[in-house]
Amino acid sequence: MEEVIFSAGLVYLYLNGYVENEMLCIQSIDTYRHFEDGFYQHVIEGSTIADEDDEIVHIFAIVGIKEKANQIYFMLENTLKDNFNHILAGENIKKSSKMLDKTGNAFFRCVQEFFCEQLDHFPKQVYHDFDGFIIRGICCSRLPNYVGDSITNKIISLWLEREEPMLCGKQLMIRSFFVRDFIGRKVIASFPNIENGSWRFIFEGGHQISIDEEFSYLKETLHPNDLGGFCSSNVQSILMNPIYAYGQWFQPTDICEEWHKVFLYLCAVSDNEWNEVSISKIYDMFLDFLRKNICITMEVPSLISKSEYYKILLMHIINFRSFLKGEDEPVLSKDLLQTMNSRYVYLPYLWTLIPQITYKSTFSVNNLKKQIYEAIKENDSYIKGILWENVVAYVLNNVEGLKITGRRIRAGNQEIDISLVNISLDDQLWQLGAYILVECKNWSSHVDLHQIRNIAHISNLKGNKTSILFASNGITIDAQKEIYRLATESSFIICITANELLQMTSAKDCKMLILDKWEHLQENVELASIL
């Protein structure tokens, strides 16, 4: 049996574009923003809408290390030829390959459906060779060849100019993906670089970016000499580096560290009771994955035993689990959490290493309504709060992709009613972030402005991007205005009422209600930015 080609390190890309009034307009969809089914849905929707214009050019491309990209391209090309023969013979077309992982098959399916189910699209090859990586794929348009080819080259040139792709180890990095890790992080200082006159911005977590003409894909951490001592990021870089126990230097170090954070997140959100034996087996498989797909390695002398290193990993997992329950913990966990908000696209490649959580819905409309009415009618304020929390927990336990990790957890002087983590492979749900705070208010009056600001304060301390307020009787107008204002600062509070819960008819309705509320906030942010 042939080994599956991992898509890790590659970027699958769909571009379309057209020229209007000598201006080039393009749309870009890639697997560093959407994964698996989400990528497929966005490409099909985007290409279908764009195809209504006869002037449009479509490009499907694999961007990454030559060996992998070529393997996948030739597989696509050969299957396209076979599928055209199947169509002529009145047979079904092939939409997947056993040689590709789920991400690769999402792209594979897009290409086969686009070209084989719409026979007015005539595929042409796209190929650009760079230092160590290639852009290879298929394009088409209804324009004359010389016009279509010219627009194709302009689209790719514009994408290259915007993204400045670069091979980091064995992983292809692009600008928009790289800088996304800094969204939500506070700028805490700026330092001048005396040697070249440029400046460095220091972000929360000790990460820094040099502000100069040559854009670097290395995040770099604040050097101990800058502060006269170690900061949290220096300590974290040491604790998450296999060089000390395995005698192997995984390069680039910052890319290796990103993958470690996603690995530790999966370990923390799993139900496994980790020990040195179990973590060693999984970790060895993880490092083998990095060697094959992501990092270049160099042999160096080891400094500590593997047993000591496993104790460090277990300590990270325990601390992060506590953080995800809602408990207070220093900045290491907060930095890991903020990384997850953009690097969740790594999850599909590591998911198979950690036993998956099976989802079983226990949702009953009658049960939900009964719990809601009991909570609203209760007169004792303490019991009233407990009953409403039970309603919320029942609802959230039936949202596929979310997992409750803690209830009524003390965080400093505050109490967090419910803590949620994202355990999905759903890029829509990942818009909400890795960790979600939930506040429950079963008041006879509307929740006011003060409570909204209190929720925002706790969210800011924890470093999460989304909170959900279940307010049985809704919120005041001033509170709603404050929610809109906070959204413009990338702090999102979703409000759900008892009446809205009573309208639900399935477990899927609750997930859609949360996502619809999120989209509504996004639309208000976009409107505010225009005005």
Image (cartoon, rainbow, N blue to C red):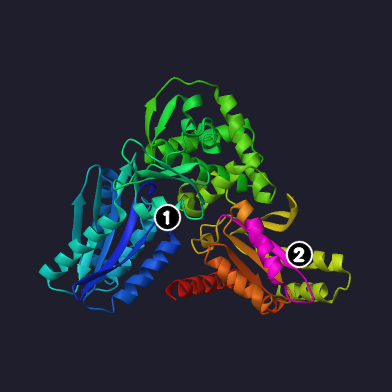
Q: Quadrant of the N terminus?
A: top left
Give the x, y percent position of residue 28. 33, 64
What residue is rendered at 77% in x and 77% in y? 445
Indicate left or right for 55 with 350 as reference.
left
From the viewer's perspective, is the residue at label 2 or at label 1 nearer? 2
Does label 2 or label 1 sit earlier along the sequence?
A: 1
What residue is rendered at 61% in x and 30% in y? 311
> Which residue is denoted by mark 2 in the rendering?
389
Give the x, y percent position of residue 518. 55, 69
Indicate left or right for 467 with 188 as reference.
right
What residue is rendered at 43% in x and 60% in y? 34
Q: Quadrant of residue 322?
A: top right
Type of residue at label 1? Answer: Lys
Residue 123 drawn in magenta: no
Give the x, y percent position of residue 474. 70, 76
Type of residue at label 2? Answer: Glu
Q: Secondary structure at mark 1?
A: helix
Q: CB of mark 2 within 8 Å of CB of mark 1?
A: no
Give the x, y percent position of residue 121. 22, 71
* Crowdedness near tag 1: few (<14), some (14–19) or many (≥20) residues, C-alpha within 10 Å: some
Indicate left or right for 177 with 154 as reference.
right
Q: Between residue 232 and residue 73, name the one nearer to us.
A: 232
Is residue 219 something one can see in this rendering?
yes
| Region rendered in magenta | 434-459
* Crowdedness near tag 2: few (<14), some (14–19) or many (≥20) residues, C-alpha within 10 Å: many
Residue 453 drawn in magenta: yes
- Residue at far left of view: 146
Residue 102, label in figure: 1
Q: Between residue 33 and residue 290, name the one nearer to us.
A: 33
Q: Is 318 rendered above or below residue 407?
A: above
Q: Quadrant of residue 78?
A: bottom left
Is residue 81 something one can see in this rendering?
no
